Image: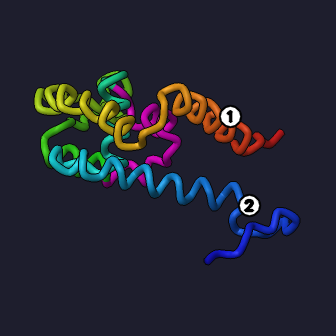
Amino acid sequence: MSDPVDTTDPLALEQQVCFALSVAARSVVAVYRPLLEPMGLTHPQYLVMLALWQRAPLSVRDLSGLLQLDPGTLSPLLKRLEAIGYLRRERDPADERSLALTLTPAGQALRARAEQIPPAVVARLGLPIEELRGLHAALTQVIAAARPIPAT
């Protein structure tokens, strides 16, 4: 039997927001894994595709900002998605220094299959949609609050 949580200890593992967020993130990504594998996508690649389905074409810089990932982290994801035929990386004619990302017909067609993922995740989690929306709102606030303060 586990010990009760000591609410007076400021370092109790079970009291740490970082611990709860870390475990929740790993657990939710694990729910996505079997849904994404038949499409040949990892969870980070799925996030790239979500952004492109919504806003393509995008520059790597814009995608980096949307996903809050540095371009160096994105590069291998983009190369893999290009290799499997879901997107194209091309020099932006308006700015040769910038890479433009566009969906291929296969990448566009994949969206229809991906539309089945959100309801499957909601069903698997078994939480009312209102609770999930509230959780999303709370996490969005945490993300905003944790952003670095710009140097002046």
At label 2, counting other C-alpha atoms closer than 10 Å, the crowd grade (few under 14, some 14-19, many 20 or more) is: some
From the image, tell me which residue sits under label 2.
15
Quadrant occupied by the C terminus:
top right
Q: Amino acid at mark 2?
A: Gln
Q: CA distance from mark 2 to mark 1?
A: 19 Å
The residue to which callout 1 is attached is 141
Which residue is drawn at the image coordinates 26% and 27% (left, top)? 115
* 141 magenta-colored: no
CB under 8 Å between discs 2 and 1: no
Residue at image coords 30%, 36% = 120
- Indicate which label's residue lies in the foreground, 2 or 1: 2
Query: Magenta residues, as a range?
Result: 58-76
Q: Is residue 9 left or right of residue 112?
A: right
Colour setup of the view: rainbow
Front in this rendered view, residue 15 or 50: 15
- Residue extending farthest to the front is 1
Q: Is residue 72 magenta?
A: yes
